[in-house]
Image (cartoon, rainbow, N blue to C red):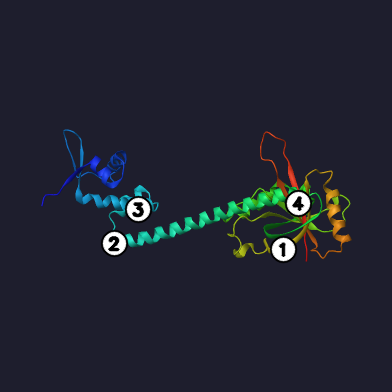
Amino acid sequence: MKEQYYSIGQVAKLSNISIPTLRYYDQIDLYKPAHVDTLTSYRYYKESQLYILDMIKSLKYIGTPLTDIKTVLNYTPAELFCFLEHQEDVIEGKIQGLQEIHKNLQQTKKQLQQQMKTALATDVFEKTEDLQIFTLPVENYAPQSIPNDCYGELIKLVEAEGSRISSHYGCIYPLLDYNSMDEVRCTHIFTPLMTDRLNSHPAYRRNIRLISESRFIGIAFQYHPDRYIEHYQRLYHYIRSKELPVADHVYDLFTPTRYSQHKEEEFMVELKVQLL
């Protein structure tokens, strides 16, 4: 039985692949016509070639580069099976990456929502939230004097394992009756964790603090170096006057509220202490 031939236009319609794409496949030796008319340069394909396009489309769909597809088309069934198993691992890795991106997005939205809600507070407030932060010890620095190099090291450690940094940073210091910022000395700096990637990493167990649904007493204000201690004292004396059972340290979260380079920078500070 004589085999039927199809023009490039017919193949394009049958396979739902554009003519320019078929020409490109010919150019890179991925899918060549069975016959080219020497007078007209028209390309003709055998009917038996059509199934190859199905395989090419399937491999492209799972993200296989065209250069790899050329090799895969020559595989035995056993080799193809091993290749597909590998591709499955690759796809699962991409899915995990997308899930982390999605969680990062959710965390960013949550942070912004909390930031907007906190900004509306005009006095000491109480709230319940999950605390998930990556910390790094520091010594003998006041909050406003922590070198950028320290935060650079924090960023380096978090991003080394593929996690992501938010634009929120903070420090931790003892809850004491300070009269000026010069008396405050931080024990740690921190940034909120945007994914769970580092949570089970044994090398970072001491760096990570996870507190689920914990209650905090706090105060928030627009940052100004001359008024920081005033707001801190309001929080401190509120805690002492109410005889609240609290942890012995303060979380100071420093958050930008403007990102435009054409406006004056503005930051919000949230001071909070865990209620026991």
Residue that numbered label 4 is attached to: 270
Residue that numbered label 3 is attached to: 59
Q: Is residue 36 left or right of residue 207?
A: left
Mark 2 or 1, nearer chain start: 2
Task: Residue at 29%, 52% (x, y): give it.
Answer: 54
**Image spot of residue 210 (x, y percent):** 67, 63
Residue that numbered label 1 is attached to: 214
Circle 2 SS class: helix
The amino acid on which the numbered mark 1 sits, given as a three-letter code, is Ser
Q: Is disc 1 surrounded by few (<14), some (14 to 19) or many (20+) residues within 10 Å?
A: some
Mark 3 or 1, nearer chain start: 3
Of 145 and 103, which appears nearest the observer?
A: 103
The amino acid on which the numbered mark 4 sits, given as a three-letter code, is Glu
Residue at the extreme left: 1
Q: CA distance from mark 3 to mark 1?
A: 49 Å
Residue that numbered label 2 is attached to: 77
Q: Nearer the viewer, mark 4 or mark 3?
A: 4
